[in-house]
Image (tube, grey):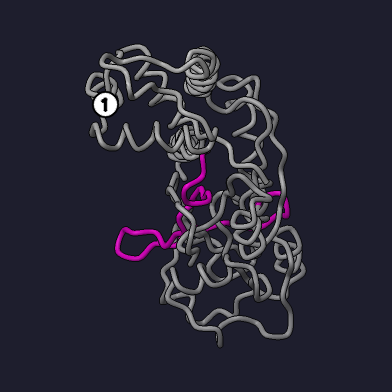
Amino acid sequence: MAAFPTLRQMQFFSSLVRHGSFSGAAKECCVSQSTLSAGVKEFETILDAPLVDRSAKRFALTTLGEEVAGRAEEMVALAEEMVRIAAARPLLTGDLRLGLIPTIGPFLLPGLMPRLDEAYPDLRLYLREDLTENLVSGLKAGRLDMAVIALPVEAEGLDTLIFGEDPFVFVCRPDHPLADEDAVTSAQLDAETLLLLEDGHCLRDHALSACKLQDRQVAAAFGATSLFTLVQMVRSGLGTTLLPRLASDAGLAAGAGLRAIPVRDRNASPSRDLGLAWRRGSDREEEARALADILSASRQRADRTHAGQGG
């Protein structure tokens, strides 16, 4: 297969033609004179013909050099134009493949989508809901551009940004002994046998860790695969549960006739962090940060609404 000259070599040669000297071209290209000379020589080697007449007393091009000069300048100009187009391209336009975990997506999207539509009307969002492990694999393999997940999570090769906090709430039937409490503590949960999602859902581990609970306090006989199923199990009297406030604020507990009570320990609320992840080194990092800003603004508005309602 034939070798082709690089844009860098053509850039060196075009600068040399404009300045008529190796020193002037080297200064323009911000390289040493020897580096620029070597680059031009490599260009000549690939073309298998001299471009600069080195026998002349003053700078001169060969006949081929004269012909190649114009073409090389065109190629460099096209490359510079591509860079300018890319730099001027608006953020979050075109297709974006976004993953979301099931314990965030259904409750986050209704408030997020109108804000995205307003801020980035040319964005085409392709959504995929899946478990954290699968979303991380999708990011690393390039099948996804970004993913909304709960942190912390071990994800080597990914960058993440936290855009919000999601406290846990205790959910029980109205006839439960704790149903009339304004708040419950982790210590009060010690006596509860909790219903949580099945293994494989990160919410299970985050809830246990945040509320300082052990697996032995979780009902082993049953496990739900979605938060919607979980609240129905509580409604039927099988036990109590912990929900992220994101889901509770969306009416998941109230819609099932259940009480949602804040969990507080010394004025602090056990919680999980909501984050946006993308592949490290991706050319969409700037867009990821722009999306994280929208997500953060959406969560802050939801938090203000919650505080205004006395939550």
The answer to whether residue 173 is magenta is: no
The residue furthest front is 55
Is 65 positioned to the left or the right of 32 in the image? Answer: right
Given residues 23 and 28, the one toward you in this image is: 23
Given residues 182 and 264, the one toward you in this image is: 264
Given residues 162 and 171, the one toward you in this image is: 162
Is 95 positioned to the left or the right of 289 in the image? Answer: right
Is 82 located above or below residue 125 in the figure?
above
Q: Which residue is drawn at 48% across and 64% down?
A: 156
Is 48 positioned to the left or the right of 185 in the image? Answer: right
Q: Where is residue 275 in the image (x, y as percent from the top left)?
A: 49, 50
Q: Is residue 127 visible?
A: yes
Task: List the residue tagged with mark 1.
Answer: 26
Q: Can residue 89 be seen in this view?
A: no
Q: Which amino acid does label 1 sit on?
A: Ala
Q: Where is residue 74 in the image (x, y as percent from the top left)?
A: 53, 14
Extent of the magenta region? 254-283
The answer to whether residue 281 is magenta is: yes
Q: Residue at x 45, y 41 (%)?
A: 310
Q: Which residue is drawn at 48% across and 38% down?
A: 45
How crowded pointer 1 is (Cα within 10 Å; few <14, some 14-19, many 20+) is rated as: many
Image label count: 1
Among the 4 quarters of the image, the one containing residue 9: top left
Is 308 located above or below residue 98 in the figure?
above
Q: Position of residue 137 (x, y in %)?
A: 63, 61
Q: Where is residue 44 in the image (x, y as percent from the top left)?
A: 47, 32
Judged from the image, the secondary structure of the residue bearing numbered disc 1 is: helix
Q: Residue at x 64, y 51 (%)?
A: 142
